[in-house]
Image (cartoon, helix red, strand yellow):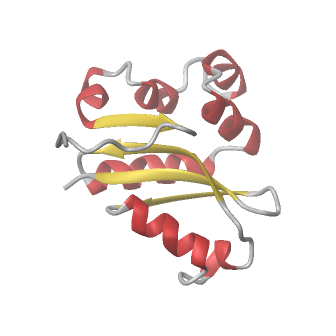
Amino acid sequence: MAAWVYILRCADGSYYVGCTTNLEQRIAQHHAGTTGGYTASRRPVELLWCGEAQRIHDAIEVERKLKRWSRAKKEAFIAGEWDRLQALSSRSRSASAVALRGESRERRASFETRTRGSAPQDDEEG
């Protein structure tokens, strides 16, 4: 079952990172404030980035990594500024950035990223 990792910008300018198996439903819940928690009092929210993983375990792993990142690293990631992301990393080459960019062969097959403005596409034509 596919899963999603996503980054929201809240009305107060903060970022929220989450994961779900139903992206449209989860974003609607954040917009409606029905989930409680962090985003309920920080609406409206805006979806800035989402990435699809083949397994929920992969999505959870990426979510945990992104949550530990600084605001500057999240902003570089959302903007696709890979050189800046690398410079902000405490290591010379961020393994997380490599995996999320799709350069890792393992991740390329199991993880796809989307930025603001690119919606998930159905496999069916019609």
Please indicate whether residue 61 sits to the left or right of residue 7 in the image: left
- The residue lying furthest to the right in this view is 12
Residue occupying the point 70% across, 37% down: 75
Q: Residue 33: percent from the left, percent from the top?
A: 61, 80
Compared to 86, does 19 lie above or below?
Answer: below
Q: Residue 2: percent from the left, percent from the top?
A: 25, 52
**Res 3 quadrant in image:** bottom left
**Res 101 quadrant in image:** top left
Q: Residue 88: percent from the left, percent from the top?
A: 71, 27
State how many labels appear.
0
Please indicate whether residue 24 sits to the left or right of residue 93 in the image: left
Q: Residue 13: percent from the left, percent from the top?
A: 80, 56
Compared to 19, does 7 lie above or below?
Answer: above
Please indicate whether residue 55 sits to the left or right of residue 51 in the image: left
Residue occupying the point 65% across, 29% down: 79
Residue occupying the point 46% across, 24% down: 98
Quadrant in the picture for the N terminus: bottom left
Compared to 21, does 48 lie above or below?
Answer: above
Front residue (pair 92, 77): 77
Compared to 46, does 54 lie above or below?
Answer: above
Quadrant in the picture for the C terminus: top left
